[in-house]
Image: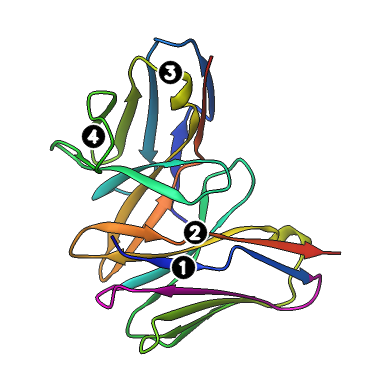
Amino acid sequence: GEDVEQSLFLSVREGDSSVINCTYTDSSSTYLYWYKQEPGAGLQLLTYIFSNMDMKQDQRLTVLLNKKDKHLSLRIADTQTGDSAIYFCAEFDTGGNQFYFGTGTSLTVIP
Amino acid sequence: GAVVSQHPSRVICKSGTSVKIECRSLDFQATTMFWYRQFPKKSLMLMATSNEGSKATYEQGVEKDKFLINHASLTLSTLTVTSAHPEDSSFYICSARWDRGLNTEAFFGQGTRLTVV
């Protein structure tokens, strides 16, 4: 399968920006996603980016995609305590009809 | 946004019994539904992929006779854990693929915490 890598932990102070990084290996991915998982809950789709885009902004969220380096990032502006959760990046292999998930980054927001 | 409903959210069952988990896409027709298992503090592990009206495709190492998947309609897939054992205790999550024009999105259910005692 494909490899999707993320750093495991990130701590930021409330009000600061958070940047969660992700690297992937499948160059044929069409879509790349960011999901949020709160304790004991399912995954919530935050945003996604089409592979022919470099950037997508949605309110406090900014997704940057560097296709050359196969690097995806999620920036959360003005991070709040409610943003504390695990964030998963995922790539979708349209040919194989399968999602590949990263290991998840646990974001802790310090008041 | 689109909603995927997964039921039940928690279930405790005795060893040797079977448990059925339902996954419904409430406001869209799902091309494909996926079943995942998540261990504590770990990422999602794909168990199987199911398309409506056809047999599920299981990932290597997943016993198809133990984890029965039925995809009866474009809005409903079920996972039945048969003859459950304590090692089957886990968090199970379904997701549904929605193809909207050129966009493909996947929405997840709330997850089911299965505890086998």
Q: Name the residue under label 3.
A: B85
Contact? badges 1 and 2 (CB < 8 Å): yes
Q: Mark number for residue A5?
A: 1
Are labels 3 and 1 on one chain? no
Are labels 1 and 2 on one chain? yes
Rounded to the nearest angstrom, the CA distance separating label 4 from label 1 is 31 Å
Seen as rendered, the residue at the extreme right is A111
Residue B59, by quadrant, is top left
A5 in the magenta segment: no
Residue drawn where x is 27% and y is 57% of the image? A98
Disc number lying in front (4 or 1): 1
Tell whether A49 sits left or right of A62: left
Badge 2: how crowded within 10 Å, few (<14), some, or many (20+)? many
User: Of the residues shown, which amino acid type is indicated by label 1?
Assistant: Glu
Disc number lying in front (3 or 4): 3
Are labels 4 and 1 on one chain? no
Tell whether A63 sits left or right of A4: right
Q: Which of B117 and A79 is in front in this view?
A: B117
User: Of the residues shown, which amino acid type is indicated by label 4?
Assistant: His
Badge 1: how crowded within 10 Å, few (<14), some, or many (20+)? many
Q: Mark 2 points at which residue?
A: A103
Q: What element carries label 3?
A: loop
Q: What element carries label 1?
A: strand
Picture coordinates of residue A48 (x, y %)?
Answer: 44, 70
Q: Mark 4 points at which residue?
A: B71
